[in-house]
Image: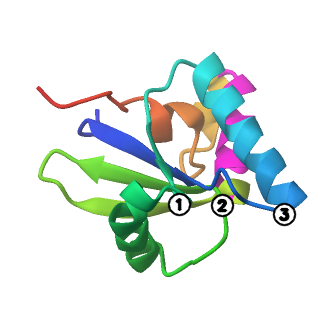
Amino acid sequence: MSEEKKLIVLISNGVSDRMQASNQNMTMTILNAKKVPYEKVDGMDPEQRERRNELFGISGVRGNYPQFFFESKDGKTEFFGNYEKFEAVSETSSWSDDVVQANPDVESWGKVFGNVVESFP
């Protein structure tokens, strides 16, 4: 099993693009339904500006929401991807174990989100 990691979701409560707003809403719905813990960083919140800019620096993408990051126990944060990547992985959640095992190179829901924790001990 991979190491535990925390999921960080960068969103913007002030996003005006309808597609991005819809993607953000769908993200929260999926994560909550699957009970995946996550830290939400609101790019519009002035109190989270420094964290937002740090995440923008890691992803190299500004103004496109949502974005997904994983933080390891040692505090290292890595960019996972954008909504399209999240959606592709989400689609695998309905796959049977046989299909997942037959496609070891595919990033399945269990492989990507199976070891996400709310916090580290």
In which quadrant is the N terminus drawn? top left
Give me the disc on residue 17. 3
Q: In the picture provided, is 31 more to the left or to the right than 38? A: right
Secondary structure mainly formed by the magenta segment: helix
**Does 9 lie within the magenta span?**
no
Q: Kindly identify which numbered label has been placed on residue 43.
A: 1
Mark 2, mark 1: which one is toward the viewer? 1
Q: Earlier in the sequence, mark 3 or mark 1?
A: 3
Instruction: Give the vertical position of 108 relative to 97 (above or below).
Output: below
Q: Do we see residue 99 in this rendering?
A: no
What is the three-letter code of the residue carrying label 2? Tyr
Above or below, comparing residue 81 to residue 42 in the picture: below
Q: Which amino acid type is shown beneath numbered disc 3?
A: Asp
Quadrant in which residue 54 is drawn: bottom left
Identify the residue under disc 2: 65
Is residue 71 visible in the rendered image? The answer is yes
> In percent of the image, x 58 and y 39: which residue is there?
108
Q: CA distance from mark 2 to mark 1?
A: 9 Å
Horizontal side of 73 relative to 107 (left or right) equals left
Q: Which numbered marker is on residue 54?
A: none
Numbered range of the magenta stretch:
85-96
Q: Which structural element holds mark 2? A: loop
